[in-house]
Image (cartoon, rainbow, N blue to C red):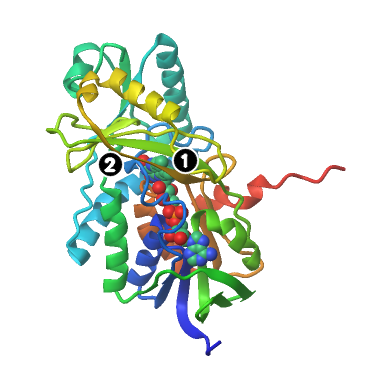
Amino acid sequence: MSTAQASDAVVIGGGLVGAAIAYGLVRKGLEVVLLDEGDVAYRASRGNFALVWVQGKGDGQPAYTRWTRASASEWPGLRDMLAEATGIDTHLQQPGGMHLLFSDTEVAQRLALLERMKLAAGNHGYEYRLVEGQELRDMLPGVGPKVIAATYTPYDGHVNSLKLLHALHRGFVAAGGRYVPNTTVTGASAAPGDFRIDTAEARYATLRVVLAAGLGNRELAPHFGLQAPVVPNKGQVLVTERTKHLLPMPTVCVRQTDEGTVMLGDSKEDKGFDLSQTPDVMATIARRSIDSFPWIGQLNIVRAWSALRVMSADGFPIYEQSRRFPGAFVANCHSGVTLAAAHALLLAPMIVAGDLDPMLAPFTADRFDVPAAA
Ligand SMILES: Cc1cc2nc3c(=O)[nH]c(=O)nc-3n(C[C@H](O)[C@H](O)[C@H](O)COP(=O)(O)OP(=O)(O)OC[C@H]3O[C@@H](n4cnc5c(N)ncnc54)[C@H](O)[C@@H]3O)c2cc1C
């Protein structure tokens, strides 16, 4: 193998998480190499539902609520930066979001959840309200009679996540980053601040390494004294033909894209690495969508896919700097669209500084360690 190619940072994984961090690092003036196996794997970054979503996130972990809200607040800045640097419009809209409710039990459970979150948020506040009757019909034209109410929070929105991924990559390269596609990291050697990363074609020497390889982090992390106990969680999504703009805001399971198609989703299935699409799940998604908005029944389904989320056991992200090998960082989450702004504009500067903010302390992977039996 030829001599190692040197850089300030190597980011492994060019999905939404790696691309956002790499973009943030290069904006801070670092010389960055982004190594990416490419679109061969599980397509989380290309198969997601594209919500920038806050409502209901962080029950039992207020630090996650704060992180998610911080990202939603940073999103307009990221949109503007990417538009200026690349000319790509990520079509961010943040009109707030609705969670539809179909029974009194669902209403009671949802209100209890959001009240709990409001209490946990303390001085940070957590605005939500129940929307019913005519107000619901005004806010969501064509909502079905089976929907008895919805909860609204003002923080939510959605984007075009394919354009986001494209813009992050283009912005990274435009700012001087080096993208190496179709390359798989096969091995590494680590010493504090001195990492060697091996691919079949080359060896990279770097001061910092960021593991952002989605489900691939599980295998990579131990090379760097880290752990990333993430597992796949399948989501199936259906997309309708284009129609006139009817939905002024996204709901958790139905949203109208900037192009006019309507996305219907998305299942949550523990099926390992199985990516098959199944008629029963697709039928359930379609039925729930038509119950939500009966007019969807008039539209043709034009596309459907499945993709794998990157899940930790408690559903919260993993962010950590290796204690054994400072300079090595791991980043995993199942909301890479929502958190793209936090990754580019908040996390990347922490990585440059070599120190993760204490606000991320709850997200180290040692929270999953099970004490050995006595
Ligand atoms: C159905 C579905 C719906 C979703 N909806 C939303 C949503 O509405 N809002 C939201 O915020 N999030 C959503 N998500 C989650 C979001 O898509 C993910 O959090 C995000 O895509 C994860 O990005 P990632 O970069 O960690 O992983 P990935 O997208 O899996 O990217 C990892 C990258 O690392 C590369 N890689 C892996 N191993 C190696 C290696 N050894 N060497 C080099 N490269 C490697 C892979 O090729 C890949 O390019 C959804 C996900 C799914 C599946």
User: What residue is shown at x 42% (from left), y 16% (from top)?
Assistant: 106
Whether residue 65 sits left or right of residue 242 in the image: it is right
Where disc 2 sits, the SS reads: strand
Q: Amino acid at mark 1?
A: Ser
Where disc 1 sits, the SS reads: loop
Front residue of 115 and 252: 252
**Quarter occupied by the C terminus:** top right
The answer to whether residue 267 is seen in the rendering is yes
**Quarter occupied by the N terminus:** bottom right
Residue 350 place in picture, x, y as percent? 45, 63
Q: Nearer the viewer's eye, disc 1 or disc 2?
A: 1
Front residue of 374 and 278: 278
* Furthest residue in direction right, as rendered: 374
Residue 180 place in picture, x, y as percent? 40, 73
Query: Is label 2 within 8 A of ligand 1 (CB to nearest ligand atom)?
Result: yes
Q: Give the residue at mark 1.
A: 276
Whether residue 222 sits left or right of residue 99 in the image: it is right
Quadrant position of residue 80: bottom left
User: What residue is shown at x 53% (from left), y 76% (from top)?
Assistant: 200
User: What residue is shown at x 45% (from left), y 12% (from top)?
Assistant: 105
Q: Amino acid at mark 2?
A: His
